[in-house]
Structures are given as C-alpha cells and as structure tokens.
Image (cartoon, helix red, strand yellow):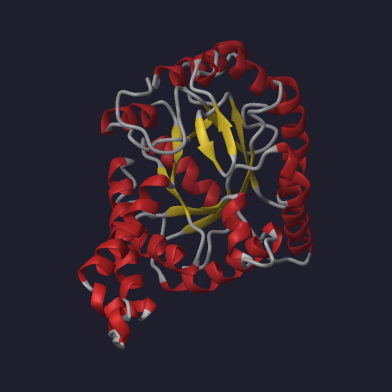
Amino acid sequence: MPIATPEKYAEMLDAAKAGGYAFPAINVSSSQTLNAALKGFADAGSDGIIQVSTGGAEYLSGPSVKDMVTGSVAFAAYAAEVAKNYPVNIALHTDHCPQDKLDGFVRPLLEISRERVQRGEAPLFQSHMWDGSAVPLEENLSIAAELLERCIEAKIILEIEVGVVGGEEDGVENAINDKLYSTREDAIATAKALGHGERGYYMTALTFGNVHGVYKPGNVKLRPSVLKDAQEAVVGEFGLEPGSKPFHLVFHGGSGSSAEEIAEAVDYGVVKMNVDTDTQYAFTRPVAEHVLRNYDGVLKVDGEVGNKKQYDPRAWGKAAEAGMAARVVEACENLRSAGRTLG
C-alpha cells in the first residue's frame, strides 16, 4: 500500500487507542533495515510506524555528507516507493529531536511538507518528534505549541516528550533517577498548553521509568500506573468523560520490558512504542553468525580467494533482514497489533 495518508494515520492511532493495542515504531538507518521492518509488519499482518533518529538520518545521507535533512528526504522517498508492495499501512516518523537540532532537522522537514501540501501532495513524513525533555517544562511546552501550529499546516502529527527518559540515544544521555517519572501536574500542564485533542492532533511520551539502550529486567522500575494517573488527572481537570483517555501516549525506552509491563502501558492509552535496541541486535546477530560459520569464505585467509557467495553483502544481508523482521513480528504480538490493519 502507499504510505499512510494523514487521515489514515490518525485513524490508525485512534483505532489503536480504542482497541487496546499499539504499533511498534521501528528505528531504521539503511535500506536493509527499512526492508526488514516492512517485511516484519507484513508478516505480522500489522500496520506500523517506521522512523529515523537524527543519527540515523545523518547516516542515511552518506558518511561524507552527514546531513540530516538530506538523509531524511532520501529515506522518505525510498520508503514511499518500496512500501507500495506491502499489504499494510506504514507511517513515517522522525524520532527524538533535541532543541539544538530543531533548525537542522524538524523545522526544515516541516517546511518541505508544508510546501508539498500546498501543492496538493502528501507530507513527506506523517509525524515528527520534538524532544524537550532537557529543557524546563514551560519552555518545552512553548516550543511544542509553536511546532503544533506548523504541524497542523503540514498535516503532520506532533509527538512531544514530557519527562526524562534515562540512558543514552544519539549522544543524549540522562541519569536514572526520580526525574524519569512524569507527574499529574506535568500532564495537566501539557493539556493546558496543547489541548486534549480539540486544538490539534499530537502524541505524548510521558515517562514512567523508561530507559534507552540495554538493561536487564529489574534494573529499572517501570511504573505504568503513572500513565493511568496522567489520563485521570486530565479527565478530572477538564471535566472530560469519566474513563476516557485524552492522551495518545508513546512508550520510549522499552528494551528489557516485560510483556506484562507493555500490556499494562497499552491498557492506559499507549498507541506507539519505540523499538530500536532490540531490532539492532536482531539484525546484527545473524551477520556475526554468518561470518563465524563461514570464516574462510568471508575472508581471504592466508592468501586464498575466499568464497564470493559467502562475502557477497546479499548473503549476510538476507540473514540480517530475516532476523530483524522476526523481531518486528514479536513486537507486534507483544503490542497486540498483529493481525490488525485498516486495509
């Protein structure tokens, strides 16, 4: 199918919140990892989200170019073409963008999409993330309000982060402490600044102990009940329908989370869960196995010629893509999106 239209993407997210499931948002940094993600979603029969970080976008532009906008535009164009051959809806998203990279990443991409929409075309991406976790909440929400207006013009959904995700991603590192837990007051301030859906569509990454990168279960205490408290706080503050979930929530830093923790977070309104660390390993592990099993063929050992069929990048590339695709299927199953596509 073609990349999801803005209307289809909003329908996907609304259906997920109403139906009690969420979409994996798979980070990619190459055509191979993109193809693996697409295959994984198709194998699972799930609609999904594929995203690039600032580092991933820079890498996609080429090692001597290192331009995030160039890499993002190239990624979106390639994805739009190859996604047509898969029977599921795919949305494209840009991941964590801190304040010092807004002018070199999200704002130029928003302008490209605004111009495309004015010409009657689809936006380049379906959503962008502003990561204001490193600045005071008031400043975070002020920038978010400005970006939300620009996103509305470009028919793009904004994602924001309220709170701090621990660990490290693309050079941004945060300590693991009590700041990892968003408060009821944070949630109310967000709704006052951006509305609860009536002023424009946005997603909110509230934090409940999340950590980027690799950690073993139990090393960090996730408290999904933080999300329930946030939803209830906004419902009470604005007199919304009891039991409703005003926020479309995003789950960051999910590596090492238990199936029970993921399910609980989804129950409280999570519609998108970022998956990066686990799929990176799932991609690389088969490559390591291929090299170790075919050492003499992959390398020209002791002056020999090696085995072209074994060092051909397609040989290990296919194994890597299969490994990553299988992990995407697992993510869809954990988030209950497997078998769910709007067609």
The image position of residue 169, as x and y in percent, is 53, 41
Residue depicted at x 38% and y 23%: 220
User: How many labels were placed on the picture?
Assistant: 0
For residue 136, above or below residue 111? above
Q: Where is residue 47 in the image (x, y as percent from the top left)?
A: 41, 54
Left or right: residue 224 versus residue 108 is: left
Tell me if 16 is positioned left or right of 256 in this view.
Answer: right
In terms of depth relative to the viewer, which is nearer, 49 or 278?
Answer: 278
Residue at the spot x=43%, y=74% of the render? 85
Residue 339 visible to an observer of this rendering: no
* Residue 319, horizontal then vertical, whole percent: 29, 68
Q: Which residue is drawn at 48% across and 57% down?
A: 28
On the image, the x and y values in percent for residue 249 come to 50, 32
- State the residue in front, 39 or 232: 39
Q: Which residue is drawn at 62% across and 50% down?
A: 54
Residue 102: quadrant of the picture: top right
Q: Would you identify the image quadrant in which residue 61 lies? A: bottom right
When the figure is inspected, residue 60 is found, relative to residue 228, above or below; the finding is below
Residue 174 visible in the picture = yes
Q: Would you say 26 lies left or right of 237 here?
A: left
Q: In which quarter of the image is the C terminus?
A: bottom left
Which residue lies most toward the left here? Answer: 293
